[in-house]
Image (cartoon, rainbow, N blue to C red):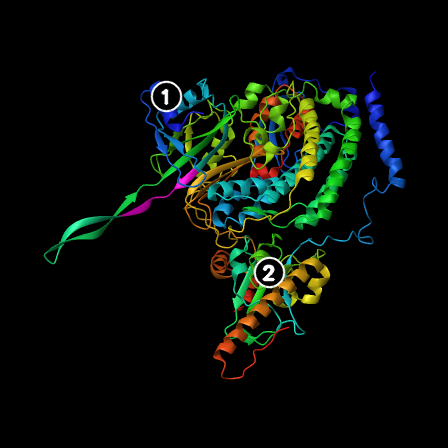
Amino acid sequence: MIGTGILRGMAVTAKNFVGSYFDKERLTTVQYPEERIPLPENSRNFPFLIFDGEDAQAGLRCVACQICEKECPPQCIYIIKSKDKKPDYVGKPQFYPAIFDIDISVCMSCQICVEVCPFEAIKMDKVFELSKRERFDALLMRKTELAKSNEYYHEIHPIEAAEVDGNLAAAAAAAAAKKKAAAAVAATSAVTPPTSS
Amino acid sequence: MSVGFQELAAAPPPMTSRLEGELLEISMGPQHPSTHGVFRMNVALEGEIVRKLKPVFGYLHRNHEKIGENTSYLGSMPYTDRLDYFCSMTNNWAYALSVEKLAGIEVPERAEYLRVILAELTRLQNHASLLGFLLSDMGAWGTPLMYAFREREKILDLFESLSGSRMMCDFMRFGGCRVDASEEWLGRARKIAEAFPKFLDEFEQLILSNEIVIMRTQHVGKLSAELAINAGITGPMLRASGVNYDIRKVDGYGIYPRFKFRVPLGDHGDCYDRLMMRSLEMRESLAILKQAFAEIPAGPITNPKVKIRAFKPPVGEAYGRIEGPKGELGFYLISDGSASPYRYRVRPPSFINLTILEDLCLGHTVADVMVILGSIDIVMGEVDR
Amino acid sequence: MESLEEIKARAEAVVPDAKIEIVLNPGPANQPSLLLEALSALRVARFLHDDPALRLDFCSNATGVDWLDRKVKTTRKVKKLVEGEEKEVDETTEESVPGYLEAVYHLYSMSHKHGPVIIRSRTVNRADDVHLPSLTPVWRSAEMQEREIFDLYGIHFDGHPDLRRILMWDEFVDHPMRKDYVEPDDYEYEPTPHDEVLERAKEHYPARPELEQLTPRE
């Protein structure tokens, strides 16, 4: 009979309408910004730079090797390498980025910079409420805005950060062991290699 | 001399016979809500009947292929997400498959399973939202679309917790996938796939026996099998015309030969068949998912031989294709041995499926044009590239 | 499916004046192709489409490729008299190969479910003689794709029913997918233009104080 199809369809809408008062499955929306759904661990938005220790600028892991700048598909990273070397957080002299800008109006959150970085220096952030009143310069993140602490990284990506820390510690231990062995071969002078945390 | 309302009402101007038979040309789009993006059609009408229809493309053209030729092989991967932004996982797969063909890369077992799972989930959410959009085009504004989006959202949440992004997943890499799926993730995905048939039943009850839907779609936009083959139509649209051609079966790429599934076929090739086709394909996707979840082995997800930096495939060319949710998605690559492809070509299914838009619409009314366009299933990011 | 050599032999038997060459593909994909002449391409295509054993009824992908004029260096060992002695010496000759535009078609068969057979044809040069026969009369799916090739590469397909620009606007003059295409200087605003972009942007927009502010960044 004509009309039964429509009635059957309306039964579905009625079920959904009434169900939305009782069933969580049928009312899935939340009242943003008062209510928020927690972001999953892997969620990513824009990159940031990790620093260790207290001083944000001295502790940057980035050594300005410019690999991410080269690999970035939309070319949103702009790095100028320092002329001098400064000791990093473990005291080893390294180059550092004199300028490190990421244009987040160009960045497409592809995570390739994170994948290619050999120093675990750049990671993906989860902050997404970045709207600005101005279109251009406000969306250009300078080095000072990009630097975020390792603790922050642990906060937003706990599993991944623990893994990264483990890898770094293992690499540091291997390097220390190698140095120790070299020192033992050199043997005569009693210089203890600097241990890194 | 100005004519007031009263005079007009008293003596309506007579219709001159001179105008009869003349065509009225109108431009539909590029900002029309039913054109699925910025798509324009120049339509010549005789009354309500379409006599001529010329699609106009290019509003979203950004020369994706040129960008691909100027960036590294890996650098194109996130750009492929933005082709058909509904199905970034399958886009990734098609591109990865072509590069793997070009460079002769093996993919580990677990990665293949993950790819199948993600591709079928993509198919589910694409088809579900297509049904919603199509009903929107017919005038069921919002409600069915929101039901479809509610289900889609669950799948997008899965994508986000795995790859980090809901739509721009950028998940696959040459010779594998970027991150491994945890047991917990697989469990959640399995649960969502198991609950999906319930939604499908409800959705079918909502629309498929609805008299209005039937009247608007049956015998509208009929596509014959001969024309479909000759015009290179692929995907659900081709199968709705009764041609048994599914690249998952024909090429058997990845590990698809291991799965048991049927290829649904249409009979009439009209809009209703195309609509039904999506619904039936979702059920087959669920069958594949069920098998994949049961069989997925443990193991590595990337091929350790593939370098992430300075990846240079040997000189040669390759054409790889997969059965995307919208049709055959192919990538044609020519390598000259350098770090970026010499030629990078996308074979976009929704662009080529639009070839016969005019043939389908001729003789139908303007309102039917929207239904026909909706049943083709296009995404402008892919059409214009 | 029969091998490319067999297809070539049969096609040449059916279309007697056709000269078909097999283009090898050295990569692991191993997808060699048939190079057709412009003169006979349409008839060969018709044969590929109609032949009951091949029945390549589905033209999946049609695209263009731009090959620039290039210089080929060949090194040969030549026997020469050096200081009264006969020695083998490497001699390098340079030869310039004219560039061409190429149209590539990937054909499959939906009835027999085989493929791909790849056919390609080349224009005489890249400048004035850029005509190829359109294969749209054989495969309708080439219609939009040949328009796209015409738009982006500038190959004129003779016999195409509706050869217009498709992605670029009608008034556009150049062909953006060509390898030697130069982008116009109308860059959008970039907050940190540097190097080449900055130079060109400055030239194009002389009165932009915000750019001046940005320069002393190094």
Host chain of mark 2: A
In percent of the image, x 72 and y 22: which residue is there? B216
Residue C14 relative to residue B213: left or right? left
Q: Residue furthest bottom?
A: A189
Q: Give the number of callouts.
A: 2
Tell me what residue is drawn at x 43 percent, y 46 percent. Answer: B314
User: In the rendered structure, are the residues bearing label 1 and label 2 in contact, judged by CB atoms less than 8 Å apart?
Assistant: no
User: B362 or B220: which is nearer to us?
Assistant: B220
> Does dot 2 land on a helix, a strand or a loop?
strand
- Seen at 73% across and 62% down, the residue is A155
Residue annotated with mark 2: A102
Q: Which amino acid type is marked by label 2?
A: Ile
Instruction: Point out the residue furthest to the left here.
Output: C84
Q: Is residue B50 found left or right of A156 in the rendered image?
A: left
| Placement of C14 over or under B199, stated as above or below | above
Per the image, the residue denoted by label 1 is C10
Q: Tell me if I can see residue C164 in this picture.
A: no
Rendering coords of residue C158 (x, y %): 41, 27
Foreground tag (1 vs 2): 1
Residue C44 on image: x %, y %: 39, 23
Magenta-tinted stretch:
C65-74
Host chain of mark 1: C
Quarter of the rendering containing residue B204: top right
Q: Is residue B385 magenta?
A: no
Give the SS element for disc 1: helix
Q: Quadrant of residue B241?
A: top right
Above or below for A126 versus C14: below
For the residue carrying disc 1, how many other residues have a C-alpha within 10 Å: few (<14), some (14-19), or many (20+)? some
Question: Could you tell me the amino acid type at mark 1?
Answer: Arg
Principal SS element in the magenta part? Answer: strand
Q: CA distance from mark 1 to mark 2?
A: 60 Å
